[in-house]
Image (cartoon, grey):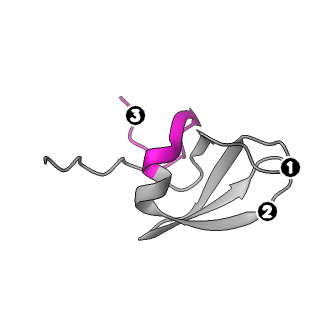
């Protein structure tokens, strides 16, 4: 089995995950990077820590890239 390279994530990226938050919001802002990714709900502001592998698997799309993301 071939391992996939990690998805490049940057602070202040806004992503849409597969499942919505119980408050109904589906956009999340990345507030912490590392082995665990810190996310803040765009609707209610709730913060959660989720393992990097789980976040990479659950990302549907990027709404906005953070200011440190490279420009193509």
Does 59 sit left or right of 14 as displayed? left
Mark 2 nearby-residue class (10 Å; few <14, some 14–19, many ≥20): few
Sequence-wise, the earlier of marks 2 and 1 is: 1
The residue labelled by disc 2 is 46
Give me the C-alpha separation between circle 3 and circle 1: 33 Å
Does 60 sit left or right of 9 as displayed? right
Does 62 sit left or right of 56 as displayed? right
Sequence-wise, the earlier of marks 3 and 2 is: 2
Does 34 sit left or right of 46 as displayed? left
Residue 71: mark: 3
Kindly give the residue lying farthest to the top in the view shown.
Answer: 72
At horizontal 24% and vertical 49% (from top left) the residue drawn is 5
**Toward which corner of the image does residue 19 lie, by quadrant?**
top right
Kindly give the residue lying farthest to the left in the view shown.
Answer: 1
Q: Position of residue 29 (x, y in %)?
A: 65, 51
Residue numbers of the magenta segment: 56-72
Sequence-wise, the earlier of marks 3 and 1 is: 1
At horizontal 13% and vertical 48% (from top left) the residue drawn is 1
Q: Which dot, 3 or 2, sits closer to the camera?
A: 2
At horizontal 40% and vertical 34% (from top left) the residue drawn is 71
Give me the C-alpha separation between circle 2 and circle 1: 9 Å
Labels 2 & 1 near each other (Cβ < 8 A): yes
| Residue 63 falls within the magenta-colored stretch | yes
Along the viewing direction, whichever of 67 and 49 lies nearer the viewer: 49
Give me the C-alpha separation between circle 3 and circle 2: 29 Å
């Amino acid at each position: 089995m071939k391992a996939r390279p990690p998805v490049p994530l940057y602070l202040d990226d806004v992503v849409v995950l597969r499942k919505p938050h119980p408050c109904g919001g589906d956009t999340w802002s990345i507030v912490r990077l590392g082995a665990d990714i810190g996310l803040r709900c765009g609707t209610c502001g709730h913060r959660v820590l989720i393992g990097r592998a789980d976040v990479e698997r659950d990302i549907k799309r990027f709404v906005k890239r953070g200011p440190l993301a490279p420009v193509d």
